[in-house]
Image (cartoon, rainbow, N blue to C red):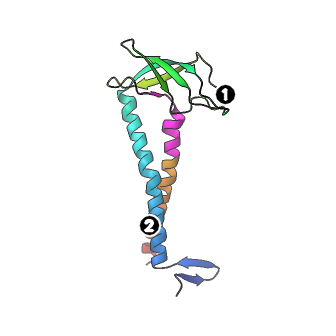
Amino acid sequence: MSPFKKTGSKIKLTGLGNLMTRLLMLFFGLVLLVPCAYKLYAYGIFRDQAIAVSGVIDKPARGLEMGSRPFVEYEDLQGNVYYIKSKAKTHWFYAPVKGEKIRLFYLEKDPGAATVDSLFYYVLLPMGFMAVGGAIVVQVFKQKWRQTAKL
């Protein structure tokens, strides 16, 4: 017995196949939605509590790619100098230049762990994945609501 029932030109999932498909869609939707929502939340809290400073690109990262994650040198409010490698790409269409200024954020508790200001990497990219995950989750429940409304 096949889990598919043939109705005209469409194949309709029934019973266990329908349930498993929805559970898989729900799983993938939540895998996209939850981490991205947490990343946005954590970045929002970080930006709220962080101190903004200006850093200087000390050495562009190696590689032939156009955008890169450069090494940045910055000074905290007490005058201590720190040196980090950016986790986010700062230049997308051209290579970073040594001596170029770049905006950084760090927490007063841990000034050695700074984050480069990158709207695309920390806000727009997670929002895009979160929208896809949210659309998948909504689609799972929207299909269920349609079926119960037809009964």
Q: Which amino acid does label 1 sit on?
A: Tyr
- The stretch in magenta equals 113-128
Q: Which amino acid does label 2 sit on?
A: Leu
Mark 1 packing: few (<14 Cα in 10 Å), some, or many (20+)? few
Q: Which residue lies furthest to the bottom in this view?
A: 1
* Figure label count: 2
Question: Could you say which is closer to the camera, residue 53 or residue 82?
Answer: 82
Residue at image mark 1 = 94
**Residue in the image at 43% along x and 68% along y:** 145
Q: Are marks 1 and 2 in contact (CB under 8 Å)?
A: no
Asked if the stretch drawn in magenta spans residue 8, the answer is no
**Residue in the image at 35% along x and 25% along y:** 110
Residue at image mark 2 = 23
Label placed on residue 46: none
Q: Is residue 146 visible?
A: no
Magenta: main secondary structure equals helix
Where residue 133 sits: x, y (%)? 48, 54
Q: Residue furthest front?
A: 62
Q: Quadrant of residue 62?
A: top right
Above or below: residue 118 compared with residue 134? above
Where residue 58 sits: x, y (%)? 55, 18
Where residue 121 sits: x, y (%)? 52, 37
Question: Could you say which is closer to the camera, residue 36 or residue 6?
Answer: 36
Above or below: residue 52 compared with residue 67? above
